[in-house]
Amino acid sequence: MNNIHTAAMPAPALKRMRASKLNLLLFLTGVTVVAILPLILPNKFYLRLTNEIMIYGLLAMSLDLLLGYTGLLSFMHNAYLGIGAYATGILLIHVFPESLWLAIIGGVLITVLISAPVGWVQVRTGGLAFALLTVAFGMMFYTVGWKWYSLTGGDDGLMGVPQPDITFFGIKIVSSGDSFGIYYFTLIIVLGLFLLTWRVVHSPLGAVLEAIRENEQRAAFIGINVRLYKLIGWMMACGLAGVAGSIYILYRGYTGPGVMSAFAGAGVLMMVLLGGMGSLWGPFLGAAVFIFMQDYISTMTEHWEFFVGLVVILLVLFMPGGLAGFYGIMTKPRGE
Amino acid sequence: MSTTILSTRDLSRYFGGVAALNLVTLDIMDKQVHSIIGPNGAGKTTLINVITGQLEASGGKVFYQDKDITKRPVHDRVKMGLCRTFQITSIFMGLSVRENIRIAKQAQAGGSLRVFSRRDSLQEVSKATEEIISRVGLEDVADQPAKNLAHGDQRVLEVAIALAGNPKLVLLDEPAAGMSPTETDQVSELIKSLGREMAVVLVEHDMEVVMTISDRVTVLHQGGIIADGSTQEISENEEVKRAYLGTENWAPLIEL
């Protein structure tokens, strides 16, 4: 039955179907590897590193939604991870020390609420002006984190964040501070949000965002309210970054103003470029390469930034589409 | 007789102190091909830009179906059925031809806020997309990215995107620019057939096209209207000949 069906399909469609089967297989393999990693890894250090890769992968993916799908460049998307982390942490300390879920939901909500007026200003611009505004707002948020001692702990960072048990409808699933449990908690949330975002970019809404990326003028002249949809794309990206921030504070139990620095923002952008924008999964690989490289090189020299920069330059020169672009070239059927 | 679909009243647009458009009062009739001609710099594209909302009017008003739309944003006007093409091709280069038309159709038909469904779940949109693809004859390249298309096909796609908006009035800014004679013939046939279904405003330098398919012609010169009438009246108008004198488009006008 299946064979009759495929035999009737034209060759390009058949190739596309094979390609999508391969993609699905690789995706499932990747998830399985990440899922069994804690069982085979020798020490906790790599567990924490992989956990961090998942969190920054989520952040890089949310930037990809903005950059690769809506065509808007943010140099400091990490600001919204920072806001999510601080907001969740502050809620845990002062408001919900017992309820992680309420703190996370509250933290993400605060991130989205802050991103709305910022986005309202942002979407009035495009291109270079948009990118510069992200830096301007990012620096303001950084300064708030750095200087508002009573709320954020200033340059000491936010300390003493409680790590309550993770419960699910009253049943305790992860004990306080259990890095093994937090790893799987992260994996489930990141995986869920990846699938959700995948769904969104392939929806009619995703088509609108792509149209804006390709040609804003034409998008307006087919009847799209460009500013409104840019704002929707922006707030979705900031909300996802806020979730990444919530998990970040949970996994670390601490955050400092450093996560909101322009330097960290450039790192997130590099993860997206390394992995390949416009793919959603590429940024996860980009985050893996970047964080692993940063960790590996920093054991050999304290000037690791220099070498990370060098590797990024080489990759951008010789693999301009990033890892996702490279994969696309390798799996493309000949003659297409 | 046909009814007025769009009118401008004393419409002006200044760039610095220069009037690119000066007190233009014009009525566009439904189901007609209405050409706007004039020497380079006459204000033709500026007129289209102000009518469609690409540029703000410095003075005067635009009425569409008796509603004042002078201050309406672009996307509102498009949703009301006011669609256009651009002199410099403005399409979604990175998207396939089919997706170019499909997204234009989706923007017009609605469903853009469906976040969790597939794009092809909008079945009416997909169906209408295929109809437009076959109407303009882009079936063979429908799966190609728009950037891979030959210039002529890109110009046709430009028109197809405008048609996907279900226009009541479509403004075509030099649709045949850079086309081969065969392609020009095909596109003028298409424009002529559109003129039976909707109001068409055509800006075109190819006088042969203008004189063959227009129901009415307005001549702009230095931002103002110097003549308005049938093709016959325009080709006999002395002031029009003087305006074109010495320009590259002068000769073909005299021939007609």
Image: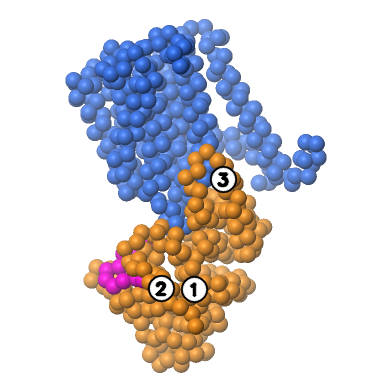
The numbered disc on residue A330 is: none
Q: Residues within 10 Å of mark 2 (few under 14, many from 20)?
A: many
On whether disc 1 and disc 2 are found on a single subunit, the reply is yes
Nearest the viewer among A252 and B103 is B103
Residues packed near mark 3 inside 10 Å, few (<14), some (14 to 19) or many (20 plus): many
Marking on residue B199: 1
- Determine if the magenta segment contains residue B58: yes
Residue drawn where x is 61% and y is 64% of the image: B136
Query: Helix, strand or loop at disc 1?
Result: strand
Q: What numbered label is drawn on residue B119?
A: 3
Q: What kind of element bears circle 3?
A: helix
Amino acid under disc 3: Arg
Colour in which chain B is drawn: orange
Report the chain holding disc 3: B
The answer to whether residue B244 is above or below residue B134 is below
Horizontal relation, residue B249 to residue A15: left or right: left
The residue beneath circle 2 is B6
Where are the magenta residues, as a range?
A: B54-63
The CA distance from mark 1 to mark 2 is 9 Å
